[in-house]
Image (cartoon, rainbow, N blue to C red):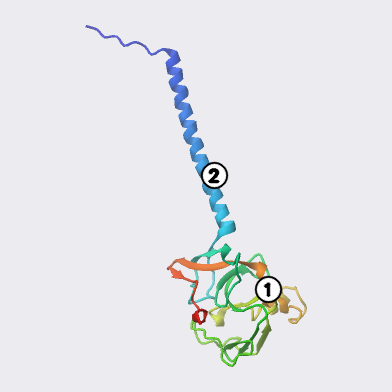
Amino acid sequence: MEIRHKKEPQTMRRRREMERKRNIRKEVFSWIRMFVIVVAVVFVATRFIIINATIPSGSMETTIMTSDRLIGFRFSYWFKDPERGDIILFSYPVDESQTYIKRVIGLPGETVEIRDGGIYIDGSDTPLEEDYLYEEWYWENDGYYFEVPEDCYLVLGDNRNNSADSRVWASEAVSAGLAVTEEEAYSYSFVRRDQIKGKAIFTYYKRFRNLTNTAGYQNK
């Protein structure tokens, strides 16, 4: 007995084809929407919440090594001020297009004297304990006296013998033509509060390290 298959009506075929195309469009729009959401979340996160940075130099060794990648939080200082020992990311005072990373040493209103490889805060007879230093400090380790302005911070690298920091920025400002003398360029020695981008929290490559409490005197 011969079985003949009925031919599918043309309207049914069209309906199926239209449904297939609709499903494809829905799938494409779904992926586009997901992509837009991901991009928006990443933009908001990197703009307002986190800093993802790669360290280009050894100025913070051995706390942070060259080529380490780290995460910083932009919101760390929304409701409180930086503390001594914090590692911060900030706009370099002499050229704010560049981002630097250093450790907070001097707080607003304090005096900071660098004498014979020691740091003395507000005329203290005892130098700051700095167990985090990379090696014995011999470069630019004497003859500095700073009066930290209000709403500003004095910062230094942990690798003191290889760190362009508050000790030399006045000289760099003169070289950049921003002032005629180092006395005129004195304000460039400090990081203003509004130049701080965030607090370094941890490195995640090439190693993991918590950066939020690397200065022992923070607990004293």
Q: Which residue is mark 1?
A: 151
Q: Which residue is mark 2?
A: 36
Contact, mark 1 vs mark 2 (Cβ under 8 Å): no
Residue farthest top in this picture: 1
Q: Position of residue 129 (x, y in %)?
A: 52, 86
User: Residue shown at 65%/80% (left/top)?
Assistant: 168
At mark 2, the secondary structure is: helix
- Which quadrant of the figure has residue 97? bottom right
Amino acid on which the number 2 mark rests in the picture: Val
Relative to 146, residue 76 above or below: above
Q: Position of residue 18 (x, y in %)?
A: 47, 23
- Which quadrant of the figure has residue 156? bottom right
Of marks 1 and 2, the one in the foreground: 1
- Compute the Cα span from label 1 to label 2: 39 Å
Q: On the rendered structure, is 22 left or right of 169?
A: left
Within 10 Å of the Cα at label 1, are there few (<14), some (14-19), or many (20+) other Cα atoms?
Answer: some
At mark 1, the secondary structure is: loop
Relative to 16, residue 99 above or below: below
Q: Is 107 in front, or is 160? A: 107
Q: Position of residue 155 (x, y in %)?
A: 61, 77
Amino acid on which the number 1 mark rests in the picture: Asp
Look at the image and tell me in which quarter the N terminus lies: top left
Label 1 or label 2, whichever comes before in sequence order:
2
Relative to 179, residue 119 above or below: below
User: Residue shown at 51%/48% (left/top)?
Assistant: 38
Within 10 Å of the Cα at label 2, are there few (<14), some (14-19), or many (20+) other Cα atoms?
Answer: few
